[in-house]
Amino acid sequence: MDPNDPAAVFTGLPTRLYLDTGVLQRLWDFGGVVWEDEPFEPSARAARVPHLADDLEALRRIFEVNDRAGFEFVVTEASLREVEARGQAGYTRWVRDVEDTWLVQSEGVVHEPVAMERLGSVSSKDWLLVHDALTTSCDGFLTADRPLASQAPILVRKTGLRVLLPADHWALLARWAPLWR
């Protein structure tokens, strides 16, 4: 993709994004900040989480644009297993609702399993999610996991999947956000 060609950049925006469990947890814990524009007033524990305020601001902007853009946000069984392992019933129900929304959006689409060996130094746990993203034809993988995001160059080169931190995804969208307002 030629970064100087606006049409190529626009058509290259990820439109089907896999939500990793770190992003899902941020959305669950701070939904008021993301969807209701409530001020971010972190607890002492949350204040120690690196990049949390930046992630939340980027997620707020991404979902504001999505009100009109209609991107697909994908959750799969691999994500649900991680969520269920946390033992929070309300959080699990909410993530299942997110998954249900995507299943309705993608009804009738057949996803073929992708045969591919783990790449780079992606952990085996993260590879399950990345593999699901590839199998469900995602072109983006939204993560709050900095070590996974550090593997973005090899993943995009070998698979075409763009692994993005919330701020990185917002940086791609910001130029085009006025089109969806």
Image (cartoon, helix red, strand yellow):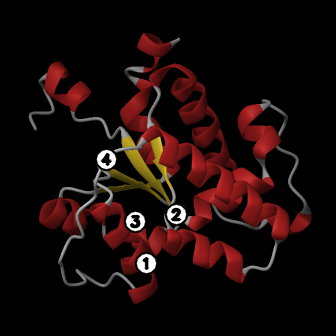
Residue occupied by mark 3: 149
User: Of the residues tagged 2 and 4, which is closer to the observer?
Assistant: 4
Amino acid type of the residue that numbered disc 2 sits on in the rendered structure = Asp
- Tell whether label 1 touches label 4 (CB within 8 Å): no
- Name which residue lies at 83% across and 69% down: 89
Name the residue carrying label 2: 20
Residue 164 quadrant: bottom left
Residue 126, labelled with which disc? 1
Within 10 angstroms of label 2, few (less than 14), some, or many (20 or more) residues?
A: many
Instruction: State if disc 1 and disc 2 touch (CB < 8 Å).
Output: yes
Amino acid type for the residue under numbered disc 4: Val
Residue at 30 percent across and 35 percent down: it is 13
Horizontal side of residue 2 vs 32, given as left or right: left
Task: Give the label on residue 109, or none.
Answer: 4
Using the rendered view, name the quadrant where residue 50 is placed.
bottom right
Instruction: Decide which of tag 1 and tag 3 comes sooner along the chain.
Output: 1
Mark 4 → mark 3, Cα distance in angstroms: 28 Å
At a point 64% along the width and 36% down the height, the residue shown is: 60
Mark 1: amino acid: Asp
